[in-house]
Image (spheres, rainbow, N blue to C red):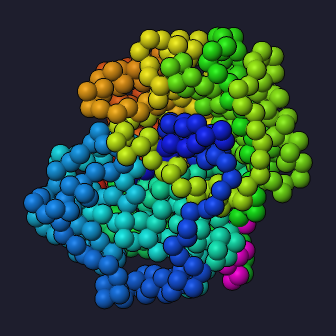
Amino acid sequence: MAEVSDGRTNTPDGGAVSRRGLLAGAGAAAITAAGTAAAGTWGANAALAQSDAAESVAAGADADTAIFGPVTVRPGDFRYDNLLRGNNFRFVGRPEEIRVVGSTDQVVRAVSEAVRSGRRVAVRSGGHCFENFTADPAVRMLLDLSPMDAVGYDAGRRAFAVQPGATLGHVYRTLLKGWGVTIPGGGCPEVGAGGHFAGGGYGPLSRRYGSVVDHLYGVEVVVVDRDGTARAVVATCEPDDPHRDLWWAHTGGGGGNFGVVTRYWLRSPGVAGTDPSQLLPAAPQRMLQHVVIWSWEHMTEQALTGLLRNFGTWHERNSAPGSPYAGLYGILQLSHRAGGTVMLVAQIDADLPDADSMVTGFASAVTADVDLKPALDIRRTLPWLHRMTWPGTGEPGDVLTRRYKIKAGYLRRSFTETQLAAIHRNLTNATGGPNAGMLLIGYGGQVRAVAPGATAIAQREVVMKAVYQTIWEDEKEDKANLAWVRGLYHDVYTDTGGVPVPGEVNDGSYINYPDADLADPVWNTSGVPAHTLYYKDNYPRLQRVKARWDPRNVFRHALSIEPPQAG
């Protein structure tokens, strides 16, 4: 499923900052002091060994003798409750069984059993889906892919193989240690590659290198034929690949729609040769980070809207492909007034020419004509891997407070004055909590170099992503928190029926931040369906892929792609 995450980090002065900075992919660790990186699990040799196994599975060999599982856990087993929940504790399903699998063959057998017995199946890799896609009461078999976490180089395909259970932190560590390369994925190390990649994937390096799927060479997917037969299919971006449409659907179509992804292959487009260190972007050596934090004590409406307006204007002017500022990744994080702070984060490869002066220029542009004195203003450089795998940045809040609601929207340009007023109004009302707020996240750059139809990501002209969020502790607080974030979102998009209808300013939403409200006529009164908000003109093509590869509609959820109507 589509999954993302982040959580609680520490400010340089030791104070805790609890928020859903996960979405930004940089906000969380950007304010941490430099320290030791999380210990890596796989060295280059281990990764190469796993790569050999990956190649064998891709070739059709049964690798079950060397790989974990399968394990079946049912109610009554003491492991059941331990494995039941994903990252968002709001959603707890009750499947008849949790099948923990370790290979493609095991996935094929599990899906076959589910189809034969008429049981609804759902798939979990990292477990960071924002909605109840894997916890739907109708789901009878939950497939847990977390043991499938190998990362390595596949010489036969001249691409890096990543299994869906690999967390982003594990992917970054392995690619860096083995070959000095990386992908432009999210900054939340505990998110699983399975959902992150399928929905498009983006992060601190995306303005420089594009979305993750802009480097997707191929996928291995367990699909179900019309007669109920489950089988593994490899689909690549090669023009003559008869399965190419299945590859395309996984370049932003989202998880849980077409089958079970059991392997991704990554290689940048247009690269030549067989040297693995040249087949993906080089990982930065160091990241320069600049953080400015202001207190709400002195935050006027003019100051707040000035920061938002300036942040948007800068991205309008500096988000073209090839822009000298494409390497700079910025986040503006605004807590509710009850949370106490507003934070600006800038991050850039410290070894890019004029990196320091670009960060200075960015911070100056965002704060221009804004009369505020920072509570904290700090700039420092730290190793890139430390930043991307900082321990503890993968969870929202602490182990007891994983209840949250996330909503999102793409922006083609700055918010309108009406929207700015709505943001201030909701961030200063009496109903928001200390862990409520929103983020503006820099986007664009090299992402905009790809045509909307080249991948399933249709929103290629946007320059920012907006994220609206709240996290809380107890089930008794569900109603109040949901009401607050829904109220904020509807107020910001009140002129377009409560949702970000594509137009001059807004451009729909991101499927990896799934929000079932977009399909609910109570909250979406625009007349524009959720599938248009997520996929725009790419939706009919995704429907055709669905009809071909999942004709029985085995893989579905609250926001899934629907088969085309007959006739």
Q: Nearer the viewer, residue 231 or 91?
A: 91
- Left or right of 346, for residue 351: right
When the figure is inspected, residue 101 is found, relative to residue 505, above or below; the finding is below
What residue appears at the point 43 percent right and 65 percent down from the top-left corner?
164
The residue at the point 70 percent across, 72 percent down is 180
The image shows residue 500, relative to residue 382, as above or below, that is above
Residue shown at the point (23%, 66%) measured from the top left: 99
Total labels drawn: 0
In the image, residue 221 lies at what x, y percent?
Answer: 38, 68
- Picture quadrant of residue 396: top left
One can see residue 496 in this view: no
Report which quarter residue 552 is drawn in: bottom left
Residue stretch rendered in magenta on the structure = 274-282
Instruction: Give the main secondary structure of the magenta stretch.
Output: loop
Please give left or right for residue 287 compared with residue 299 in the image: right
Q: Quadrant of the C terminus?
A: top left
Q: Quadrant of residue 69?
A: bottom left
**Could one spot residue 292 in this view of the protein?**
yes
> Residue 531 magenta-drawn?
no
Is 330 left or right of 317, judged from the image as shown?
Answer: left
Depicted 213 relative to depicted 564: above or below: below
- Residue at 76% over, 20% down: 373
Where in the figure is residue 284, as x and y percent of width and height? Answer: 74, 61
Specify the farthest residue to the front. 14
- Residue 51 pos. (x, y %): 51, 82
* Of residues 123 and 144, the one drawn nearer to the viewer in this rendering: 144
Residue 74 is situated, as x and y percent measured from the top left of the image, at: 13, 62
Q: Can residue 280 be found in the magenta stretch?
A: yes
